Image (cartoon, helix red, strand yellow):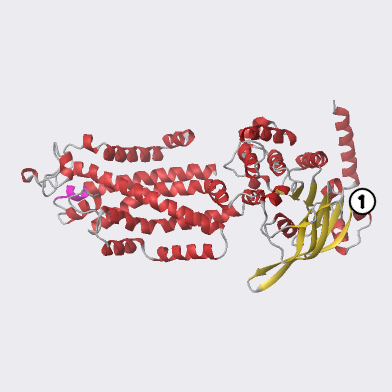
């Protein structure tokens, strides 16, 4: 672990990724202390300062009801990161367990798991999430459910492929001939060898989950006002381009910073863990 | 047979490949005597590995039975059966989990079969490593940090760990260089004598067969075509397939033979 951190710190691109992601995470976690106007995350109206371009103390300007955009971005990060964590915490175990089982077991269990996965994979992700959000009420919880529903099949497919390859390795046959149980073979023998691609994909996906959640909010299907959300902030400001550019550009840059940061770390992890295995 | 530890009776295996039925092994009658090394040789696709997989319980036979101590083995093997029949594979790097230390790999065998107390297993791992000529200090290393010969010794130690009495050796030396091969073969011979082990030695290397095997079973197209003692097989091969295999053994030229003798004499002279 120390070695991985050392390599991440030595590579300029992965170091940039670490800096960006650390800034995003610190901003979200310590928003109550960093945000100049913490109360602006909610339904606050300040018409004396509405639609201000960047100036002091509004370093990223204000929105159409006079709320500080910088403060709202910090709180929007909090929602985005929470969404990323919850989605991955639910989707990854489902995908990993189903992928391990489908890859190792033979016959109908493998067939059934993979055909269900194929059904989910055959529907474009955003369309699937939009359909779910159309059926359900557009809330944060439902947003998480919708994104989770489109995310787990990718882990099933990834882990299935890795498990199929690992199953051919001699150590699996050795465990079988020793009499190890199927759960032991799946979780103690094969799973540790699947972890490098899973960890890499999780890091890359963190950025993509933020992007997809922002896309849903942009379409009005995600987190609802007055809760700050990067996608809905971009959507609200887009009507006033190019005059009130700060309404769109800063939330858009915030999305870019988060996604770019996670992608840089994901790429570095892929190189490090790939070389290790 | 009174001294038979493992025997196959009318053993056969047919695989379905698409709509075709491929006979991998047919009507095999064979017995492995206690403390014996029985070599199984044959060309690729002759059914050697299928025989090993049937004995290990990886595949279930289509026809016939396998007996362990004259009792038929069930299709679903119990731990007591698995404990007694172990495997050493061809590629020692693949045979050891790259994410587990040597100690963890060896402890797994002890844990599964409940050998010793949890406290005594640590010492048991060390003694297993000593048995195969490895320094117990290597126990905390991962396979990638070991040489090919050391890995194969760990794989042999793992096969010994459950106190097995039959070991299927699936080309255990073919992935090793010649010097390491010789050392591993010597180790296998020593362990066989020490622990009264019986080996089913699958190989295509007749030079290895001549050094380690008591008897040789020759397979061709899934059938047992010849079963003889090693000396008889090399002096008087009967089956066409055996003659072809022997004829294909590379012959050392007189000049190479002279060089080998000279080197061997020099090495003997250099030995302290």
Q: Which residues are magenta?
A: A244-249
The residue positioned 69% from the left and 62% from the top of the image is B60
Classify mark 1: helix, strand or loop.
helix
Q: Quadrant of the C terminus of chain A?
A: top right
The residue positioned 77% from the left and 42% from the top of the image is B181
**In this rendering, would B177 be left or right of A243?**
right
Q: Residue furthest bottom?
A: B19
Image location of residue A72, percent across then percent down: 20, 44
- Residue A9 is drawn in which quadrant? top left
Q: Residue furthest top?
A: B272
Image location of residue B14, percent across then percent down: 71, 68
Is residue A248 found inside the magenta-colored segment of the image?
A: yes
Q: Nearer the viewer, residue A215 or B247?
A: A215
**In this rendering, would A117 be left or right of A56?**
right
**In this rendering, would B48 be left or right of A143?**
right
* Residue corresponding to mark 1: B231
- Residue B236 is drawn in which quadrant? bottom right
The prevailing secondary structure element of the residues shown in magenta is: helix
């Amino acid at each position: 672990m120390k070695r991985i951190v050392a390599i991440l710190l030595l590579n300029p691109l992965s170091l940039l990724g670490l800096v960006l992601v650390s800034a995003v995470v610190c901003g979200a976690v310590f928003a109550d202390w960093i945000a100049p106007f913490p109360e602006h995350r909610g339904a606050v109206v300040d018409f004396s300062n509405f639609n201000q371009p960047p100036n002091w103390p509004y370093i990223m300007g204000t929105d159409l009801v006079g709320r500080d955009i910088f403060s709202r971005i910090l709180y929007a990060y909090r929602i985005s990161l929470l969404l990323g964590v919850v989605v991955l915490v639910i989707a990854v175990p489902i995908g990993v367990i189903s992928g391990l089982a489908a890859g190792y077991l033979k016959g109908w269990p493998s067939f059934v798991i993979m055909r269900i996965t194929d059904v989910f994979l055959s529907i474009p992700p955003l369309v699937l999430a939009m359909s779910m959000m159309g059926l359900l009420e557009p809330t944060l919880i439902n947003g998480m459910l919708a994104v989770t529903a489109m995310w787990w099949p990718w882990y099933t497919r990834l882990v299935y492929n890795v498990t199929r390859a690992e199953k051919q390795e001699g150590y699996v046959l050795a465990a079988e001939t020793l009499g190890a149980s199927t759960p032991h073979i799946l979780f103690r023998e094969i799973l540790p060898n699947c972890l490098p691609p899973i960890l890499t994909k999780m890091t890359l996906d963190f950025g993509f989950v933020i992007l997809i959640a922002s896309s849903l909010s942009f379409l009005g299907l995600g987190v609802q006002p007055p809760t700050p959300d990067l996608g809905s902030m971009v959507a609200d400001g887009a009507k006033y381009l190019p005059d009130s550019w700060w309404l769109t550009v800063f939330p858009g840059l915030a999305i870019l910073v988060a996604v770019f940061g996670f992608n840089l770390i994901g790429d570095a992890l892929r190189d490090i863990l790939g070389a290790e295995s | 047979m009174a001294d038979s530890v493992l025997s196959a009776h009318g053993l056969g295996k047919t695989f379905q490949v698409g709509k075709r039925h491929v006979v991998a092994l047919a009507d095999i009658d064979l017995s492995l005597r206690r403390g014996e090394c029985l070599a199984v040789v044959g060309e690729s696709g002759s059914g050697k590995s299928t025989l090993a997989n049937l004995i290990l319980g990886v595949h279930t036979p289509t026809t016939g039975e396998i007996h362990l101590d004259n009792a038929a083995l069930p299709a679903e093997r119990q731990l007591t059966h698995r404990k007694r029949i172990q495997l050493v594979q061809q590629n020692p790097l693949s045979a050891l989990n790259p994410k587990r230390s040597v100690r963890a790999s060896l402890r797994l065998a002890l844990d599964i079969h409940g050998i010793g107390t949890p406290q005594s297993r640590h010492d048991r791992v060390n003694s297993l490593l000593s048995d195969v000529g490895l320094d117990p200090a290597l126990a905390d290393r991962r396979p990638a940090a070991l040489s090919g010969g050391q890995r194969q010794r760990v794989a042999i130690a793992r096969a010994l760990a459950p106190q097995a009495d039959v070991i299927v050796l699936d080309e255990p030396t073919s992935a090793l260089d010649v010097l390491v091969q010789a050392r591993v073969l010597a180790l296998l011979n020593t362990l066989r004598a020490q622990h009264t082990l019986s080996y089913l030695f699958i190989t295509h290397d007749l030079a290895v067969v001549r050094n380690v095997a008591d008897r040789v079973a020759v397979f061709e197209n899934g059938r047992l075509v010849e079963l003889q003692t090693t000396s008889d097989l090399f002096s008087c091969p009967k089956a066409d397939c055996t003659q072809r295999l022997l004829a294909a053994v590379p012959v050392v030229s007189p000049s190479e033979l002279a060089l080998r003798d000279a080197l061997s004499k020099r090495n003997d002279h250099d030995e302290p």
